[in-house]
Amino acid sequence: PNQLILNVSPNTTICYGQLYQIYGAAGGGTQPYNYTWNPSTLVGAGPHVVTPTLTTQYTVSVVDNNGCPTLPKIITVNVTPQLTATGFSVTRCDKMTAILTPNISSTNVGNGGPYTYNWSNGSTASNVLVTANYITNPNTYTVNISDGCTMPGAQAVFTVNVNPLPSGTFTSNVQKGCQPLSVVFTANSTSNTDTYAWSFGDNNYNGTGSPVNAYYNNVGVYSISLLITNSFGCVKDTTINNYIEVYPNPIAEFVANPWSSTILEPGVHFTNQSINANSYFWDFGDYGSSSNNSTAVNPDHDFNFVGVYPVYLVAITDKGCTDTVMHNIEITPDYGLYIPNAFTPDGNNKNDIFQPKGYGIDDTSYRMDIFDRWGEIIFTSDNFYKGWDGTVKGDKGVAEQGVYVYQIKVKDLEGNIHIYTGHVTCLPRENKIK
């Protein structure tokens, strides 16, 4: 008989999920033909529709009615692997961003691309940057990926779970003041589990908790920042620019002319040397005076009594900042002593006593001695108010007319000792006091 011939369908490559028809067509020989396939589920010449999911070889052979066989022939159907992709879930705080990139399985990489992407938000990029939105929590995004072969392609699903931001702000007990300024800041938020971190704007001076104290030693304007962190770890940055203003203090100073004077010349002129002030308040420490206070720039004041007066000057700026300085003014008692040079102890009650007069005298240290011409003491007194009546050593007889020497020692109210030596003339009319 004629030679038996077997023709088969050609080898091919299909996409995952596609169909392909294979066949085996015998010719020559003597019919009928008997076909043998591997896999054995295929019967006859075909065509047979196959849908392999992996690359598959189909083997076919034929025997004619004479028992003549053909050699087996192989039909190879190459299957491009299926494209698969996966997404993921991520958690973000409200208003934070996340990058979503699908994971294409390394064992199912399709034909290697190029891939096309179609995101649910309209993007066609390989990944997207999204912003978490707590209002629509959770946020869901899908992407369909095609490699041009796998139908209908692969899909990845992403879920962005959104945690809320803390809500709050802050207040302070003062916003403006003079240096050094102490400020108490208080945070106000919606949860008692929130934590607080502060930046007070003064050389990276920071704090935690609420309420907190901040101290500003330097003049300037400061911006305050509060970071509020909730139990989810989400942070809200609350910053208020130029929130605290610290004003400069003046410098109070003055000089007096004179710093010390006597009660006979109690007037003092004050010269103001303050810096950065525009108003002033003086307290002269002279509390018995109706003019103890003054608001003049360079005032004058007459002090009423002997003593040391603490004089205060308060310098005030236009912002109400103050500085105070104090200096002492001393008003000393004046001192004077008058010693007569003659007396007439004649009993007529006129100029009968030799006695000095004075002011500013401490009479507790007084002494007066009277000497005769031979240097003998004939009279002594330690009482400033007791003078020499002309008697000699207590005798009622009056000293003879003549010139006598005196020595007087007194102490002034400042503690200074004064010693006077001189002559006094005694002019009695009679030797006896009647």
Image: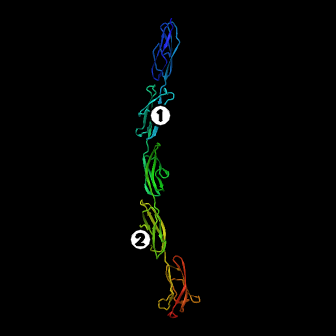
Q: Which of the colour schemes (rainbow, by chain, secondary structure, one colour) is used? A: rainbow
Mark 2 / mark 1, whichever is N-terminal: 1
For label 1, the residue is 101
Against 351, is 132 above or below?
above
Distance in Å between CA atoms under marks 2 and 1: 87 Å
Give the x, y percent position of residue 349: 47, 90
Q: Nearer the viewer, residue 267 or 49?
A: 267
For label 2, the residue is 291
Identified by mark 1, the residue type is Thr
Mark 2 surroundings: few (<14), some (14-19) or many (≥20) residues within 10 A: some
From this viewpoint, is residue 245 visible? Answer: yes
Q: Secondary structure at mark 1?
A: loop
Q: Nearer the viewer, residue 414 or 112?
A: 112
Give the x, y percent position of residue 157: 45, 32
Against 299, is 379 above or below?
below
Q: How many marks?
A: 2
Give the x, y percent position of residue 370: 55, 87
Is there CB contact under 8 Å for labels 2 and 1?
A: no
Locate residue 277: give its quadrant: bottom left
Q: Which disc, if any, is residue 309?
A: none
> Which residue is at the far left?
135
Q: Secondary structure at mark 2?
A: loop
From this viewpoint, is residue 397 visible? Answer: no
Against 61, is 208 above or below?
below
Identified by mark 2, the residue type is Ser
Give the x, y percent position of residue 276: 45, 61
